[in-house]
Amino acid sequence: MKHKLVFSLLIFSALTINGCKAQISDAYAPVGSKLLTVPPCVKPILNEWMRDAFVMYGDNGYYYLIGTTATPGRTFPGQVHCWDWNDGIYLWRSKDMKNWESRGLIWSYQKDATWQKTGKPVKPKAKSVNNDPLDSIYRALWAPELHYIKSKKQWLIAACQNGGAGSFILKSTSGNPEGPYVNIEGNQSGPLFPNIDLSLFEDDNGDVYAVGHNHYIAKMKPDLSDIAEPFKKFVETPYKPEPYIEGVYLSKNNGKYQLLQTVWSIKQKDGSYKYNRDGENQGKEVHSYDVVVAEADNIYGPYGKRYPAILEGGHNNLFQDPAGEWWSTTFFNPRGERGKTFPVTCRPAVVAVKWNNGKLMPDIERNEAFYKGM
């Protein structure tokens, strides 16, 4: 069943909250900060072309890796990419995040897709944002996330499709992360959410929420078959003007909710960098793909001012290892000025992170220890 979204439009320039004029977040991007940038020792953990890398620990002794992939063996007129089409979702697992075992294609367009198979025609001679020549159809599975819902003992995948096809949720019918996977009831005949980058979050009490690009949330039904309410906007403290944001992810630490979002830093006329536009620069000269974080006491908000957390680490997720240490994913985005300096791009990696005075940031010492000798 397709869902009609009810958007609670919040115009922060005129809005007042609890009688006070709404605040805005500081758009300053601390480009060059060694403390906040993905450390140079971080390198790919798997030599597979991948964007939007997602890692989680499954409480069964294995870490699982999933992401946006390109079809193996496909011949490209330019560089490898997935802007037009791919063959589905691949899964890897590891005991130590260094040695990965392929679990194969766990959801494919050929065998498992239903309404997702249709796709959308590509205009002749069309190119991607990275100037890659595109093929005849938009039908690629993007940004899959693998989640184990502990309270329901259920494996779910949240994913989206290009070409405006929207986002959906899949459930494992075997009780295993390898699937097979089928559509949940709420998206059997069409998308659950009309945009990209759908994510999932399980709260401490077992409530599960669908989180959508780039500012939307909806609680799910107890049986995880559908959303229980219309998607609505988080109450946020935005930038002014608000830029394009993606890669949304929701986490929880120390009793508070953290809303992670990915924003491009953009060079300004005065040589500084910001997370919004300067009026003339429309975002063509992007610099780095950064993770910013905002925190709230309530899952719907209001979320406080955003702060830069992981520079160059955008479209990530957070997870904890068995020892309780925190990690983030990254994939070395090739777009932007910083992308030109990476030895290799579009490969999965993990970044050790920590909470310093309540704020998320890279953990330089743990990164150096993890990547030593790799």
Image (spheres, rainbow, N blue to C red):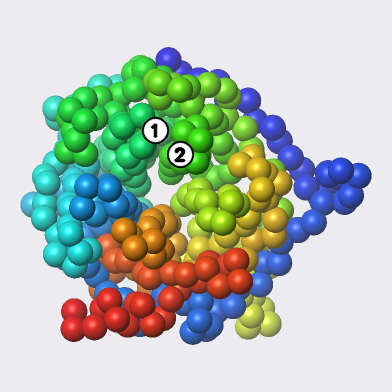
Residue at the right extreme of this rendering: 19
Q: Nearer the viewer, residue 148 or 48?
A: 148
Q: Quadrant of the C terminus?
A: bottom left
Element class at badge 1: loop
| Left or right: 49 in relation to 321 | left
Location of residue 294 in the rendering, given as x and y in whole percent from the top left corner: 62, 57
Q: Earlier in the sequence, mark 1 or mark 2?
A: 1
Element class at badge 2: strand
Amino acid type of disc 2? Glu
Q: Is residue 26 visible?
A: yes
| Left or right: 276 in relation to 177 | right
The residue wearing badge 1 is 151
Position above or below: 248 against 173: below
The residue wearing badge 2 is 202
Distance, label 1 to label 2, CA atoms, is: 8 Å
Location of residue 195 in the rendering, given as x and y in whole percent from the top left corner: 47, 36
Location of residue 43 in the rendering, given as x and y in whole percent from the top left corner: 27, 74
Q: Is residue 69 visible?
A: no
User: Mark 1 or 2, which is nearer the eye?
Assistant: 1
Amino acid type of disc 1? Ser
Position above or below: 187 against 160: above
